[in-house]
Amino acid sequence: MTGSSDSEDRSPADVEDSLTEGALGRPLLRLAWPIVVFQLLQVAYNLADTLWLGQLSADAVGAISLAFPLVFLLIAVAGGFTTAGSILVAQYTGAESERSAGLFAGQTIAFVGLLAVVLGAVGYFYTGPALSLLPSDPETAAKVIPLAADYMQVFFLGLPFLFGFYVFEALMRGYGNTVTPMRLMFVSVLINVLIDPFLIFGFADNPLFGWLGLGGLEASLYAATGFTGYGVAGAAVATVFSRGVASIIGFYVLFASEVGPDASLSHLRLNAENVWEITRLGVPTSLEQSANALALVVLTGMVVSFAPPVVAAYGLGNRLISLVFLPALGLSRATETMVGQNLGADRPERAERAVRLSAAAAGGVMIGVAVIAVAFARPVNGIFIGADVEGAAETVALATDYLRIRSVEFAFIGVMQVVLGAFRGAGNTKTAMVFSWLNLWGVRVPGVYVLAFVLGWGATGIWVGMSLGHVVGAFVAVAWFLRGTWKESIVDDARTDAEPVAVDE
């Protein structure tokens, strides 16, 4: 059986939409565009927070730029096992082993859910010590780091709710259904956008009321409630609540409908052999993502040694680059599913053709994105920092330079992400890990250090150093891909053909 989708998609039996038969372009596009929209909505979370916090202060924007790498560090630990579940669901679906796909979906949910509870508790208590390790500028330490701590602690308390939706999206993607997660993401983002300004500002100096000309209503609500919002922490509360709603709906869809793997509640009872299979695939990806997150922490540590406008520009620029990243990420994850299902169906040559097509499309699209980024960098950056905010002009100027310099690497981002998706879809998660490490630890981290501090380029050295990783990584990853060794087995260490151990009904 090939991938499934919701009722608006054609039956997987239809060759035109099949992931393992017929033309490649249509099914690849059918997988990729909802992923791009899904990630666009994910960025909308971040941009909504940045937009509202930018009206609060530039320090608030700097706070979430500090918080993100540390938050991502713990998210990455469980993220690898989520990816493993997606790979296994894709492979078993391609091999027409429907019950195995459903069983691994349930096992992944239970295992990652347990990790989320543990990591959420660890994250909540390690927030203060972790932030204290950052070698920050005195002004940054006094003004920005306490705000980052407020954000992180709320975020970690809600980690199980956040992970729930990550798992749902990954399992449905591995099955070939990317439309349903996209729709749920829209619901979640809509909730977040609606409640964000109220949780951040309350009914005191809320810019939303000013923009709508409802100052009188705001004054009345404040008089009645006295609610002044939670500031930076309010943005985290909005995210946790909206993701929690999406997670509940997502699990209902997964267990009570036929649009995804045939999972049942009995599949949630963990079995050691199945957990080992998930762990064997997931550990390299967890190490990859954790090392990447740690690299971002190290990079952030370098950045916070500069003045607050540089920190804010770095955070703002990264938020916008995460938006630019979407086409490459969509094609990468679509490629992962295509490769997984085709290797599961014993069609390695079709898998390779899909990778080549996807890489060419990603490179071309990202060149166009780079042109747009260069042309509109300044006005776009200006949207997210209030003109009357202290340091606004300097922050916007620095963020504009950052975005324009990094546009040089955009095409390389597209190609490299697609190739890494191919390695993961094949189960070669160790290979993907090595090339991802090369990107950050081999090139980007030392590049930023040498250019910004050794050669004395300052902020420009940070921007240029950040751009080097994907350029070098793309050349090396493509060279390895062309060797063809990734097609020799579906997963690392030659996975056997044995069915996974069933959980007692």
Image (cartoon, rainbow, N blue to C red):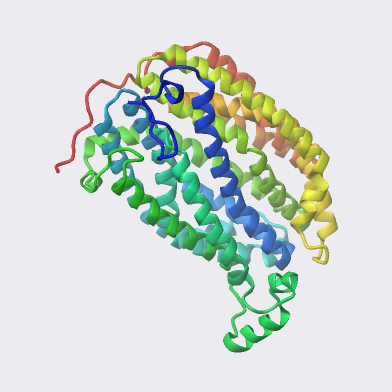
Residue 428 appears in which quarter of the rendering?
A: top left
Q: Is residue 207 above or below residue 304?
A: below
In the image, 441 versus 258, the foreground residue is 258
Q: Nearer the viewer, residue 289 or 141?
A: 289
Residue at the image position 62 percent from the left and 66 percent from the top: 147
Q: Is residue 274 visible?
A: yes
Q: In the displayed orientation, state which residue is furthest to the bottom.
A: 223
Tell me: residue 242, above or below residue 4: below
Residue 65 in the figure: left or right of residue 312: left
Quadrant showing the N terminus: top left
Say whether residue 17 is left or right of residue 222.
left
Q: Is residue 131 left or right of residue 90?
A: right
Q: Residue, x 32% and y 38% (percent of image)?
A: 261
User: Which quarter of the image is occupied by the C terminus?
Assistant: top left
Task: Decide if residue 429 is on the left or right side of residue 67.
Answer: left
Estimate the x, y position of residue 236 in percent, counting from the top left.
54, 62
Instruction: Find residue 470 and report its horizontal and vertical position in percent.
Output: 65, 29
Residue 124 position within the rendered picture, expressed as x and y whole percent measured from the top left = 46, 61
Q: What is the total number of numbered labels drawn onto the structure image?
A: 0
Residue 428 shows up from this direction: no
The residue sitting at 68% across, 25% down in the picture is 364
Q: Position of residue 96 (x, y in %)?
A: 29, 25
Q: Name the residue: 62% across, 34% down.
A: 327
Corner quadrant of residue 359: top right
> In the picture shown, does residue 215 fall above or below 150?
below
In the rendered view, would you say 501 is above or below 307? above
